[in-house]
Image: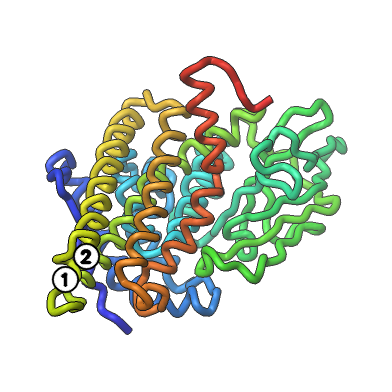
Amino acid sequence: MSQDLFQAPDYYQLDELLTEEHLLVRNAAREWVKREVSPIIEEAAQQAKFPKSIISGLAEIGAFGPYIPEEYGGAGLDQISYGLIMQEIERGDSGVRSTASVQSSLVMYPIWKYGNEAQRQKYLPKLASGELLGCFGLTEPDHGSNPGGMTTNIKDMGDYYLLNGAKMWISNAPFADVAVVWAKNEEGRIKGVLVERGMAGFSSPETHNKWSLRASSTGELIFDNVKIPKENILPNKDGLGAPLGCLDSARYGIAWGAIGAAMDCYDTALRYAKERIQFDKPIAGTQLQQKKLAEMITEITKAQLLTWRLGVLKNENRATTAQISMAKRNNVDMAIHIAREARQILGAMGITGEYSIMRHMMNLESVITYEGTHDIHLLITGMDITGISAFK
């Protein structure tokens, strides 16, 4: 078991832009990752198992609904604190951050924003503590980038709704206690539905043979005439804008999280380059390796500035969907390129589980696709600046 020697880069002294609370939250998450995630994550990834032992720790550092008000069990933190927690968790592993992102932005957020008081009181405290785990059902086998084409549906049966359909590529699905599922009613309007584990006709088979996010549990959601009590419908928002609002929050967290993965790859490569001797000197003293490392820290610093500013706008409720898309796309692309360059610096050692780089690289292949692909986010920016949609 290798020791976690991570030292976070801060080339532009961005810590000076953070409040004392931000630093306390960030440092607590950082130390927890070093203590609880780093020692077990390589084995979990090799075995393709989500380490359920860390759930209580995620709750303790406020990773579940950090911005949810304290009256509902959340930490009542601001959006920059949320981002910093996601950054530190993804520094450990993207799959672990995915679990926290789904719980916070895709399960707790819609219940808090779109649910009624009874739903908030019933679910949010238990989700915040990790007693309940949730998942988010939007993507379907035939509808990924075009979620509005979904065929999962609910029919009003008088005393209840009848839910039919299927969702796939769902993080946390195999063990989730509650699923926030999006389905069309008879008028074709998209509604949020709370589906609980144990409801007859609901199953969630696990997806196997993944080369990416191996320490995250992924599955399907299958609904075969599932009876949904009417009190399980989210009443305060419907239409495609409802799930997309959740994705805005999750994509924001990903923009921060990707920086964590990039920082870990950079820090690993920098340390290795200083220690690896070839031709009688450390490879860090060669021009080509310095070029790689200098470009890495430059791109990380640019992403840090972009995301910090986005966090300020988010705190002021001024961040737009397009701005969030730009940050998600830029930062994940940045991280995946840094992972590939870092792997080259380590040579053959870069593919082994002794170092985190190859695991980050494989994980980021999923992160660059889920919650809006690299290309879709580009088109969101394009539509925003031209006023013309290229989707149809």
- Image coords of residue 137 (percent x, y): 65, 48
Question: Which amino acid, by three-letter code, is at mark 2?
Answer: Leu
Tell me the distance, in whole angstroms, between the alpha carbons under discs 1 and 2: 6 Å
Q: How many marks?
A: 2
Question: Which amino acid, by three-letter code, is at mark 1?
Answer: Lys
Task: Choose between 140 and 359: the one closer to the eye.
Answer: 359
Q: Is residue 176 left or right of residue 101?
A: right
| Quarter containing the C terminus | top right
Look at the numbered disc 2 and give the secondary structure of its residue: helix
Q: Relative to residue 143, is residue 270 depicted above or below?
A: below
Q: Is residue 195 left or right of residue 298?
A: right
Q: Is residue 329 left or right of residue 229?
A: left
Task: Choose between 223 and 194: the one closer to the eye.
Answer: 223
Q: Are marks 1 and 2 in contact (CB under 8 Å)?
A: yes
Q: Residues within 10 Å of mark 1 (few under 14, many from 20)?
A: few
- Image coords of residue 216 (percent x, y): 53, 65
Which residue is located at x 77 percent, y 55 percent? 222
Which residue is located at x 45 percent, y 80 percent? 43
Which residue is located at x 28 percent, y 46 percent? 299
- Image coords of residue 199 (percent x, y): 75, 57
Location of mark 1 (residue) = 274
Which residue is located at x 13 percent, y 79 percent? 280
Q: Relative to residue 375, is residue 365 depicted above or below?
A: below
Quadrant housing residue 143: top right
| Quarter containing the N terminus | bottom left
Looking at this view, name the residue that lies furthest to the front.
279
Look at the numbered disc 1 and give the secondary structure of its residue: helix
Location of mark 2 (residue) = 270
